[in-house]
Image (tube, grey):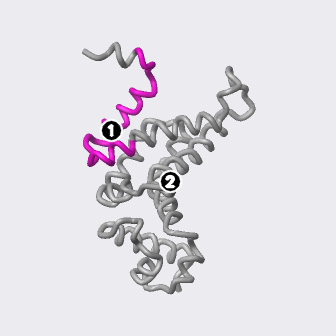
């Protein structure tokens, strides 16, 4: 007997298989359930729509594995792991990066990153007051999610040039320097 988790995993795997040959916007729930060998109501027992499937894939396969590293303040290692996990299924994520509009890949990535980073900032600033009242955990999570999301999406859109470690170094380089520092370092 399959558990709810097994069926959810079966549906996400079916979606991923379909996404490799069909634009995401054109994949139907019926195609996902047919590929998984389940009936349509089963899909809605697990997900609201196919975009929630994308959210779960990003959460479970990309971000959740990095959480223990973040919790242990191994931020660079967490970023390398995120890039590594994306690269493992390069073709799939390149297809996802083409999602535009209301449920764009960019919006989904930004939202998922914000959740993880808000948890990180909230845990690490609890009971402490920011030097600048504007710097709330929510605003910090938004800022870093958008900057990391931008780097991730550009890397994916360009076909993932560079290793995950190199990309983590580039991201770290950008976020730890002022704009003038970066400009001054041009040769």
Question: Callout 2 environment at 10 Å: few (<14), some (14 to 19), or many (20+)?
Answer: many
Residue 124 located left or right of residue 91:
right
User: Is residue 19 shown above or below 75?
Assistant: below
Q: Which residues are magenta?
A: 152-180
Give the camera-side residue of 28 and 77. 28
Numbered disc 2: secondary structure:
helix
User: Is residue 183 shown above or below 104?
Assistant: above
Question: Callout 1 environment at 10 Å: few (<14), some (14 to 19), or many (20+)?
Answer: some
Q: Is residue 172 magenta?
A: yes
Q: Earlier in the sequence, mark 2 or mark 1?
A: 2
Q: Is residue 62 at all visible to an observer of this figure?
A: yes
| Badge nearest the viewer, 2 or 1 | 2
Real-space Cα separation, disc 2 to disc 1, in angstroms: 24 Å
- For disc 2, the marked residue is 108
Residue 68, horizontal then vertical, whole percent:
53, 47
Residue 114, horizontal then vertical, whole percent:
56, 45
Residue 58's disc number: none
- For disc 1, the marked residue is 165
Q: Is residue 78 at all visible to an observer of this figure?
A: no
Residue extending farthest right: 127
């Amino acid at each position: 007997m399959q558990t709810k988790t097994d069926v959810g995993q079966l549906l996400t795997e079916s979606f991923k298989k379909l996404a490799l040959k069909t634009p995401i916007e054109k994949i139907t729930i019926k195609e996902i359930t047919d590929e998984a060998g389940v009936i349509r109501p089963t899909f809605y027992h697990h997900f609201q729509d196919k975009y929630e499937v994308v959210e779960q894939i990003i959460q479970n396969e990309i971000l959740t594995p990095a959480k223990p590293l973040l919790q242990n303040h191994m931020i660079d290692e967490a970023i390398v792991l995120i890039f590594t996990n994306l690269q493992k299924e390069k073709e799939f994520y390149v297809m996802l990066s083409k999602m535009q509009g209301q449920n764009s890949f960019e919006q989904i990535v930004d939202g998922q990153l914000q959740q993880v980073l808000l948890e990180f900032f909230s845990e690490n600033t609890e009971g402490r007051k920011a030097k600048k009242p504007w710097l709330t955990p929510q605003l910090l999570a938004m800022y870093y999610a958008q900057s990391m999301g931008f780097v991730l999406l550009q890397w994916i859109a360009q076909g993932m040039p560079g290793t995950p470690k190199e990309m983590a170094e580039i991201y770290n380089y950008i976020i730890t320097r002022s704009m003038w520092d970066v400009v001054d370092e041009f040769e």
